[in-house]
Amino acid sequence: MDTMCSPRTSARTAPRIAARRDAPARAKQRPLVAVVDDDRAVVNSLEFALGTEGYRVAAYFSAQAYLDHAETGVDCLVVDVRLPGMDGIQLLEELRRRGPVPPHILIASNPGRRCRDWAAAKSVPLVEKPFLDEALTERIKAAILESLNDRAGV
């Protein structure tokens, strides 16, 4: 399903779904990865890479955009640490405060001690930019598989 920008929502804040209108009906069965990052080059790269891996991608350019417009049924949430306004750690803390959070991964360029310590304390995977090989896609696959196993009671 494509998400369109309403006249009151700018393209900068509205989510962008990387799925073609003519995609097969089975597209709804493909895992949905939500990416929260204000760097359009990173978002474009992830949309392409994850799309080739068979994922649907919803892109959000700020933490607030995700809070305001998040898709339901997100299978994995990929969050940049450095975001305008609310940072990635604050976003994850807010989501945890609100209830269950989909599997999530922090991404960062040159993460500082606060980021590393928080991720370690909360057992949140941290993947550094630039992404090497398939580091991020492997983490996403693992997070989704673990979540499916948890739901199935495995």
Image (cartoon, rainbow, N blue to C red):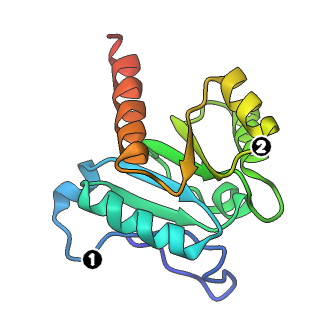
Question: Relative to the observer, which residue lies in front, 70 or 53?
Answer: 53
Q: Does residue 75 appear left or right of residue 116 in this picture?
A: left
In the displayed structure, 154 sits above or below 2; it is: above
In the displayed structure, 125 sits above or below 17; it is: above
Give the residue drawn at x 61%, y 62%.
37
Q: Amino acid at mark 1?
A: Arg
Give the residue drawn at x 46%, y 46%.
74
Q: Which residue is mark 1?
A: 21
* Picture coordinates of residue 92, whole percent (x, y): 70, 40
Displayed quadrant of residue 135: top left
Q: Does residue 125 appear left or right of residue 115 in this picture?
A: left
Q: Nearer the viewer, mark 2 or mark 1?
A: 2
Q: How many residues crowd mark 2 within 10 Å: few (<14), some (14–19), many (20+)?
A: few
Displayed quadrant of residue 153: top left
In the displayed structure, 17 sits above or below 126; it is: below
**Mark number displayed over residue 112:** 2
* Picture coordinates of residue 53, whole percent (x, y): 25, 54
Which is nearer the N-term, disc 2 or disc 1? Answer: 1
Between the C-alphas of marks 2 and 1, the distance is: 41 Å
